[in-house]
Amino acid sequence: MACLGLLGALLCMLPVATLGNRDSEGFLPAVPHNCPSKCVCAADLLICAGLGLQDVPATLPAAAAELDLSHNALQRLRPGWLAPLSRLHALRLGHNELDALGHGVFNNASSLKLLDLSSNALRALGPHDLDGLEALEMLFLFNNRLAHLDEHAFHSLSALSRLYLGCNELMTFSFNHLHGLGAIHLRTLDLSSNRLGRVSVPELAALPVFLKNGLYLHNNPLPCNCRLYHLLQRWHQRGLSAVRDFAREYTCLAFKVPTSRVRFFEHSRVFENCSAAPATSLEQPEEQLHAQVGRSLRLYCNTSAPAVHIAWVSPKHELLVAPGSRDGSIAVLADGSLAIGKVQEQHAGVFVCLATGPRLHHNQTFEYNVSVHFPHLEPEAFNTGFTTLLGCAVGLVLVLLYLFAPPCHACRSHHWTRAPSSLQELSAQSSVLSATPPDAPSRKASVHKHVVFLEPGRRGLNGRVQLAVAEDFDLSNTMGLRFLAGSESASSTGSEGLMMT
């Protein structure tokens, strides 16, 4: 029986174990649809980094919004390969072996905002290599072998705000039209660690201040030019970040030899022969404006010729076009001017106007440095004449009341408790100072009869006042005081003093 019971228990456990295995198999994570082998697919992320891929995977999930193909061995990108990824907004292709891009590589990538092509082997950019990237905001091209940029290489990147071209082999760069790149949105332009030996100082000076603040030119073999030195010195004095943060890395060639590099801001002896040209002759100075909180302000973009397009950039780096700012506090009018209905603290800073047109030789910029302050509440002047007149009037009223006001009969009939007089206090003090106190009966009998004798002139007293208590003096009748002067001359009162009885 025991054996049968044990066998039944084992038979009962078998279905449970089998069911448990089925349940565990049912909860195994399913492989996402179209996820390439060895890649990681998580929601809208597709990560295929560091797999040694030589070609892009043939199938890509359409839900991917971020694709990472960095640290592989990709050499070519076929046209239209991004067609299934309509939601893609970030593409990382850094650390590969790409040496060229080609026409149509980024078709159907109109939603892409970030493109990383750093650390590849790119040598040049053609006029159509970056077509289809109208919404791109950040482009990383540093650490390549770029030596040539087409004149219109960036013409399709109308929304680009950050361009990194550092650590390449560029020898020239057009700051006039930025190789087709618009300066309205651009905030960062990294050209550091290249081979720039020639730069146009007027073109640099004509750039808007927000782009000067993000223009990195350090670690280039710049010429030791006096005009360039004065321009960079002015930028350094103004505290522009790109120059201030990398001041030690700004170098120039003292001679036409690569080994003659000197630091711009540390070896000023190289520029001793430079005339002290004012910095304002190199770039147009910003106009200083003072505005009061709550008042209106109007800014005009004064161009040398009629402009077709006018745009503004606020101190908060917001692009201002008609009708105005997002919060509605700033309006861009039909003539291109800027109108602020009520100035607030947030409007303090540099406003930049950018004007373009066929009659303008190059894009013109104007800067307005707006300082906002609160109205000063000046205290009212202290009018001494008015206060003097008021004091005289109050004094006159008090005098008239004293002379002509009727007496108070109720005050006369009211009995006021008499306060102890000064003579009583003197009497109390004399009794305390007396060496031989009077007899008790006599003291009781003459409680209210006191006389004070003041004899400052007696000999033996050394000018001290002698206090004595006498009878027959009524303190309540103070009108009975008589002052007697005992002396040979009535006018000489100091010989023997005064006696009060």
Image (cartoon, rainbow, N blue to C red):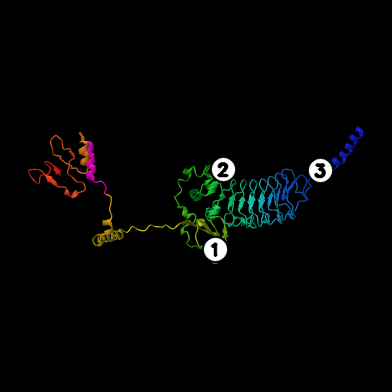
Nearest to the observer: residue 178 or residue 240 = 240
Q: Is residue 319 left or right of residue 384?
A: right
- Observer-side mark, 2 or 1, equals 1
Nearest to the observer: residue 168 or residue 295 = 295
Q: CA distance from mark 2 to mark 1?
A: 52 Å
Does residue 430 show up?
no
Q: Which residue is mark 1?
A: 331
Q: Which residue is mark 3?
A: 24
Please say whether residue 270 is one of the residues in the magenta stretch.
no
Nearest to the observer: residue 125 or residue 482 = 482
Q: Is residue 274 left or right of residue 33?
A: left
- Observer-side mark, 1 or 3, equals 3
Callout 3 crowding tier (Cα within 10 Å): few <14, some 14–19, many ≥20: few
Q: Which residue is mark 2?
A: 258
SS of the residue under disc 1: strand
State which quarter of the image contains the C terminus.
top left
Q: Main secondary structure of the magenta part?
A: helix
The stretch in magenta equals 418-433
Which residue is outermost to the left?
A: 488
State which quarter of the image contains the N terminus.
top right
Q: Is residue 408 left or right of residue 26?
A: left
Which residue is outermost to the bottom?
A: 334
The residue that appears at 47% across and 46% down in the rendered structure is 271
SS of the residue under disc 3: helix
- Residue type, label 3: Ser
